[in-house]
Image (cartoon, rainbow, N blue to C red):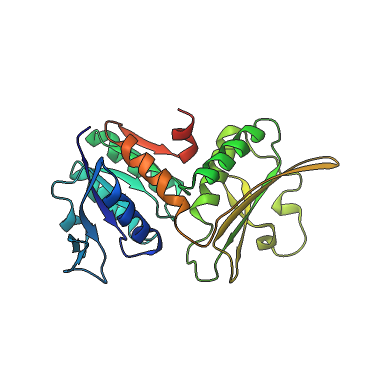
Amino acid sequence: MADLTVCIAGATGWTGRALVRAVLEAPDLALTSAVSRSAAGGDLDGVPVFATVAEALDGVDVLIDYTSHETVKANTITAIERGVAVVIGASGPTAHDYAEIDTAARAHGIGVISSGNFSITAGMAQAAAVLVARYLPQAEIVDYASDTKADVPSGTSRELAERLARERAPVITRSLDEIDGPREARGAAVDGVPVHSVRLPSFSVSTEVIFALPDERLTVRHDAGSSAAPYVAGTLLAVRRVVGRVGLTRGLDTLLFE
């Protein structure tokens, strides 16, 4: 198979560094450019580094974006308009943002794959939770991350809440209008699913969804480790699947069970 040419945005970040090594070692992928504001003008293992995505897309088949919630949407739209497929690993885009991305991708005949978490085990956890949601509509999500994480909830938890809501409308026994005390204590509603974001030192990213029926509970939980290694395999799977698609595909579990 001919090499797919790849650009990594956020190449000097926590996950980006691991992806640079992985793409360079992959026999069917070629890393042709990288994006990092802090390293712009230099190179990573001989690969030129640019300050912006717009500068880095010449000759690129797939953009991998692990930047930030502040830039990922604009980067994605820029790539789509240049005819470059996109794999989104950065968290932060809302359902409205994804609708705009899907519209742009379809208009240009380009594929985009996004996942709140590209860990294979996180994808399995999401698939299990979506299956459970067909039968147990009462659920709440607890979203754990480091105290330095700026966006809430995490992309993993936001995507999971949206997927649960699409599977079956969430059931809330007592509405916010009927509770005593601050509404914030019940979490933020993402498509009607309560999500509680905990931000404390020692957490990487953990996501827990609690389902309940009278007198019984079921918990599905994924815990990330301290390295970026778990996200590499799922990201590269998406890179290999995105070319030839049209429009937005969300969720690593979607790829795992195709």
Residue located 44% across and 56% down the image: 92
Seen as rendered, the residue at the extreme top is: 258
Residue located 56% across and 39% down the image: 124
Q: x and y percent of residue 38 in the render?
A: 27, 72
Residue located 37% across and 57% down the image: 18
On the rendered structure, is 185 left or right of 51?
right
Q: Quadrant of the N terminus?
A: top left
- Identify which residue, 6 or 146, lies in the foreground: 6
On the rendered structure, is 215 left or right of 241?
right
On the rendered structure, is 187 left or right of 104?
right
- Identify which residue, 84 or 33, lies in the foreground: 33
Q: x and y percent of residue 78 in the render?
A: 23, 50
Residue located 82% across and 41% down the image: 216
Q: Quadrant of the C terminus?
A: top left
Seen as rendered, the residue at the extreme right is: 215
On the rendered structure, is 47 left or right of 113?
left
Asked whether the viewer can see residue 181, the reply is: yes
Q: How many marks?
A: 0
Seen as rendered, the residue at the extreme left is: 58
Q: Where is 222 relative to 85, above or below?
A: below
Asked whether the viewer can see residue 251, the reply is: no
Q: Where is 32 relative to 113, above or below?
A: below
Q: x and y percent of residue 133 in the render?
A: 65, 35
Q: Where is 241 relative to 227, above or below?
A: above
Q: x and y percent of residue 58 in the render?
A: 13, 49
Q: Where is 18 relative to 88, above or below?
A: below
